[in-house]
Amino acid sequence: MKEFISRLRNTFLLILIMCLAFCISLLISNIFDNESLIPAIMMLAVFIISLVTKGYRYGVIASLISVLAVNYAFTFPYFRFNFTMSENLVSAIIMIIVTMITGTLATKLRNQDALKAESEMERMRANLLRAVSHDLRTPLTTIYGSSSTILDNYDVLSDEQKQKMLLGIREDSEWLMRMVENLLSVTRLDSDNVKLIKSPTVLDELIDSVIVKFRRKYPDKPIVLTLPEEFTIISIDAMLIQQVLFNILENAISHAKGMTQIEFKVYLRDKNAVFEISDDGCGIPKERLKTIFSGLYTGEIIPSDTKINSGIGLSVCSSIIKAHGSVISAENNEKGGATFRFALETENENNE
Amino acid sequence: MNNKYKILLIEDERNIQTFVTAMLEADGYKVISAHNCGNGKMLFSSHNPDLVILDLGLPDGDGMEVLKYIRATSPVPVIVLSARSDESDKVLALDMGANDYITKPFGSAEFLARVRTALRNFRRIDENSKFVLDNLIIDYDARTVMIDEKVIKLTQTEYNIIALLSQHCGKVMTYSAIITAIWGYNDIGSIKKLQVNMANIRKKFGVVPGSDSYITNELGVGYKMNMAE
């Protein structure tokens, strides 16, 4: 079906552009009484067709049509096909060759663009993989090291020591869990065939799930919540958007130094629900602001033994929001702290 | 007779089996372990456990098959363990009669809470004609709902939903299970109808998002009435 539509569209474009070119040619040959411009106009038409349609088939068809049209209407004898005059024949052949080459070139140009996008994707994936394998090593060291220490020296170690190491194990496995969640989302977004599983989600329920989960984990971090009164439904992949919101909230906890409270606001603007999460912490350094969503590993040197929450969380957020057809932005507040913002289209129409 | 509930754990990963067993035994339960479908079915029939914890990915078949086997003969509570995939697995398991699901990885506190809930739920079926959760009271005979001694005015449908959820409290009810029970049929607009009704109920109950209240939203799956601890 999709193929049929694209074929229909291409054919339509072909006919439209050829007709246009033909009319212009007629007009010009009437005004200037001169045919030298005609092949150039036809060539232009063929070039445009090769650019806007897929594959070279339409370009070749267009070039054939243009050769016939020029032969028929604009070379002596007028309004009659004549391939016997040798100069007509030669000009026709040249035209076919030229148009075919242009068509091929245009197709190549298009392919190159696609190739470029793909290699960009590949590069991002490689970056991510590097980042992850780097980040996994630290918590794994803790988990492996601590557990084997406890096992090997069970009787020697004091209870306090054992408890401390066990706490370390738990903490680092929690961190690993978070990382794996994020990675799962990224791979889900990257693979071409897997699409978002969108379902109509009630805004209140979405926020409720996020906040409940958040309060369970950080019971003493205050969140000020503002939601629209209206019953609002958004068509989203709820699991992924939940993760975006959770990532941003958690980010504020671990990175906004001096933060005393988080403000979580959702408001309706036109047909969109705007999500805004701001903190009153230390804000984001200017030089980080630009690359904050693109993954951290952009050539900076990282001390190899620190565990950085890699910005993977935020780059995941960015890809999830992008997959929903929107963008996420970050900025520093005037009063201090940072604000993350994105908008999603609602299905509000007020019918109950 | 209240103590030493017998729990059948059907899980093939040895490490998970070890720590879940340790966790449950430390909490005073008796644990029977099976590591595949066949073994699980056999132990279920011979031991008649009070609760089954079932991993969905088993070496010799699908855990769903065990669930079907159990449900053919017994209403015993079943908790399903699943690796995070999409919701459809969970919905399927719940619709096939599982009481709850836990996503791997999980911690001990959450796990034990679910076990307690599932066991308690099973015990209290038609205990009396009232449901009590904190300051929420549902009187099934009078068909009224009260919060803080004040009667909440609900429509027929809203009351039916609340009654249904409370009768299955502690268990996640999938959207389609609720819809079929309330309206008898299930079409495209039904989920939205349910969502609107739930929104009205929340408003009448005066609950604010994020305040771990009476009803838990399981996004994309369904709703669950919480239980008094």
Image (tube, helix red, strand yellow):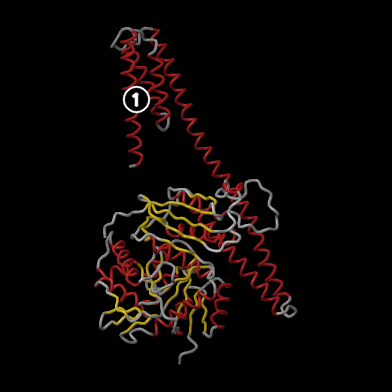
Please say if A217 is above or below B50.
above
The answer for which chain carries disc 1 is: A
Residue B147, percent from left and from top: 34, 78
Please say if A189 is above or below A74.
below
Location of the C terminus of chain A by quadrant is bottom left
Residue B138, percent from left and from top: 32, 80
Which residue sits at x=38%, y=72%? B215
Q: Is residue A274 left or right of residue A141?
A: left
Q: Is residue A59 left or right of residue A158?
A: left
Q: Which residue is mark 1?
A: A17
Q: Which is nearer the eye, B102 or A225?
A: A225
- Work out which residue is located at the far front of the displayed protein and give it: A335
**Within 10 Å of the Cα at label 1, are there few (<14), some (14-19), or many (20+) other Cα atoms?**
some
Count every numbered label the image shows and give the total.
1
Residue B39, percent from left and from top: 49, 77
Please say if A14 is above or below B166.
above
Residue B68 showing in the rendered view:
no
Residue B220, percent from left and from top: 39, 63
| Amino acid type for the residue under numbered disc 1 | Ile
Q: Is residue B34 left or right of residue A69?
A: right
- Work out which residue is located at the far bottom of the displayed protein and give it: B1
Q: Is residue B168 left or right of residue A330?
A: left
Please say if A302 is above or below B104.
above
Residue B112 showing in the rendered view:
yes
What secondary structure is marked by label 1? helix
Location of the N terminus of chain A by quadrant is top left
